[in-house]
Amino acid sequence: MREVADVVCSELGTRPPRFDVPAWVLAPVGVLVEWSSVRRGVEPLITPYAARTLCNDVQINSDKAIRELGLRPGDALEAFAETTRWLRDNDLLAGPPRTVVAGHRAHPVAWFGRSVLRAEKTMYADSGAAGAGLVATTTLPWVVLAAFADRAAGRHRVTAVLLTAVVTWTVVGSASLIREGQAMAGELQGGAGPQDAHPGGAQPPEAALLRARARLPNLCGRAADGLDAGQLSRATVESLAENTCDAVIAPLFWGVVGGVPGLVAHRAVNTLDAMIGHRDQRYRRFGTAAARLDDAMAWAPARLTAVLCCVAAGRRAPAAWRAVRRDHGAHPSPNGGWCEAAWAGALGVRLGGRNTYPGGRVEHRGYLGDGRDPAPGDIRPAARLVRAVTVLGTVAAVGCVLARPARRGVGTWAAS
């Protein structure tokens, strides 16, 4: 439905995407806006960031969705066009675009994050037991709610597909991850092509470095002050590799294993790890449960991510696999080394080394891969690997679901 993309992009003032937006995503938008109309005096449930993300993150054939759900193309087009005009007319499209929709207060992950912050204020103590209690009290209600919704939706094919689509879109973040990587490459290369725009080790202009350093927190929690182009490139490639597991393969894996509750459980645990699973003085004990549970849930997906990266590496697959087998243990994380070693071997670079974090904490990591140091020209190939692994992982997940017998009323992933 190219018309849908043209309409929303004309309203947002952005370039049309290269792919269609499915009708089953767009049709509910008009309903949600109707529920949150000005007549009721309720804050809109659809945000401009969600509207932007609908045009950038979803890549499913719309014609097939229309046929399966019995929708007319005009229904989805009219609903989405009316939605974007309504947002614009009510001054809800103002403000700079956000890369990660979860950062907005209306996003479900943001709701969960606020619940964690509130619970931490009352439950914090410098002990692992208190942290485990926080994990249980913040995660279980969402998982139980997802289980009830999953079972209720499983009775009807259309609602099952819609629920699965919405939850999957909410927890999988490959498109925003790729965009951040490409944006970092653009800052460091000055809009150049895939080759390094500053040969001979020359640094980009200081203004470009400042912009790139400002972007780094969108990808990882390292201290960006003073990092040069090579260090920023290494941090970006490492973050793309590790986050491909956390934001793409792990959610898909747990969606196959546990349906919608599995998707929600992984996203909740991964968010908790990002919020409290740190090694600083405050969270060293309190965040242990979140960090260990996240490690456990990422154990199989990390190894699957490494295998998929080797497959996507093409002619460099043997080098990628050698790096994985030889170097994965050099990483302090039981999972991160698998992903980063695969990317290092696939790109022919060497990752790892000295990392500095806010507060002055310094971490010395072992080296992954035996190639040269990363350069800005390696970021876009790393992002292409993210896209390729996402496609392979999605195909594998769908294949697993279709290959097993459907169980009536068990859940949307199994039933649909």
Image (cartoon, helix red, strand yellow):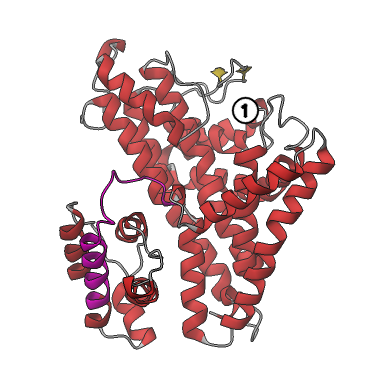
Q: Position of residue 38 (x, y in %)?
A: 32, 70
Locate residue 72: give its quadrant.
bottom left
- Secondary structure beneath dot 1 equals helix
From the image, tell me which residue sits under label 1.
Answer: 327
- Left or right? Give the position of 134 relative to 204: right
Residue 83 included in the magenta stretch of the image: yes
**Which of the two residues, 1 or 198, is positioned nearer the viewer here?**
1
Q: Position of residue 14 (x, y in %)?
A: 19, 51
Q: Position of residue 406 (x, y in %)?
A: 61, 82
The reply to whether residue 199 is in sight is yes
Locate residue 208: give its quadrant.
top left
**Which of the two residues, 317 or 9, is positioned nearer the viewer here?**
9
- Left or right? Give the position of 336 relative to 93: right
Give the vertical position of 387 relative to 337 (above or below). below
Residue 7 included in the magenta stretch of the image: no
Q: Position of residue 97 (x, y in %)?
A: 30, 46
Residues in magenta, as a range: 77-101
Q: Name which residue type carries label 1.
A: Asp
- Residue at the location (49% across, 34% down)? 239
Give the vertical position of 282 relative to 108 (above or below). above
